[in-house]
Image (tube, helix red, strand yellow):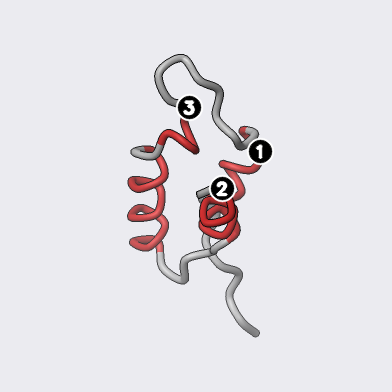
């Protein structure tokens, strides 16, 4: 589960709609937000960077 979460955190959606879908999913998973009294496995910086869209290709 952790490797899958790491891959999702690193994935950059190409559209703003993709960012919203990714954020909605991440906020529903205990691995990102911490479960009942548990600590999340990712830092705030990792989570914020995970919500950034892909850089436009040049």
Q: Residues within 10 Å of mark 1 (few under 14, many from 20)?
A: few
The image's mark for residue 30 is: none
- Asked if labels 3 and 1 touch by Cβ distance under 8 angstroms, the answer is no
Image spot of residue 48 (x, y percent): 58, 42
Image location (x, y in percent) of residue 43 = 65, 34
Residue 58's place in the image compared with 42, above or below, is below
Residue at horizontal 46 percent and vertical 14 percent from the top: 37
Residue 57 falls left or right of residue 37 = right
Q: Earlier in the sequence, mark 1 or mark 2?
A: 2
Question: 50 above or below 12?
Answer: above
Quadrant in which residue 39 is drawn: top right
The residue furthest bottom is 58
Report, in whole angstroms, how far the alpha carbon at label 1 lies from the one at label 3.
Answer: 15 Å
Q: Secondary structure at mark 3?
A: loop
Dot 2, crowdedness within 10 Å: few (<14), some or many (≥20)?
few
Residue position for label 1: 45
Disc 2, SS? helix
Q: Which residue occupies the foreground of this view, 55 or 5?
A: 5
Q: Residue 43 vs residue 21: left or right?
A: right
Q: For mark 3, what is the residue?
A: 34
Q: Nearer the viewer, mark 1 or mark 3?
A: 3
**Residue at left offset 39%, top offset 38%:** 27
Answer with left or right where residue 11 lies relative to residue 30: right
At 42% from the left edge and 25% from the top edge, which residue is drawn? 35
Say few, some or many: other residues with alpha carbon within 10 Å of mark 3 (under 14 / 14 to 19 / 20 or more): some
Q: Position of residue 56 (x, y in %)?
A: 58, 75
Mark 3 / mark 2, whichever is N-terminal: 2
User: N-terminal of the two: label 1 or label 3?
Assistant: 3
- Marks 1 and 2 sit apart, C-alpha to C-alpha, by 17 Å
Residue tagged by mark 2? 2
């Amino acid at each position: 589960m952790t490797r899958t979460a790491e891959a999702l955190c690193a994935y950059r959606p190409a559209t703003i709609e993709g960012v919203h879908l990714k954020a909605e999913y991440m906020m529903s998973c205990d691995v990102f937000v911490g479960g009942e009294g548990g600590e999340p496995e990712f830092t705030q910086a990792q989570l914020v960077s995970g919500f950034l869209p892909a850089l436009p290709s040049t």
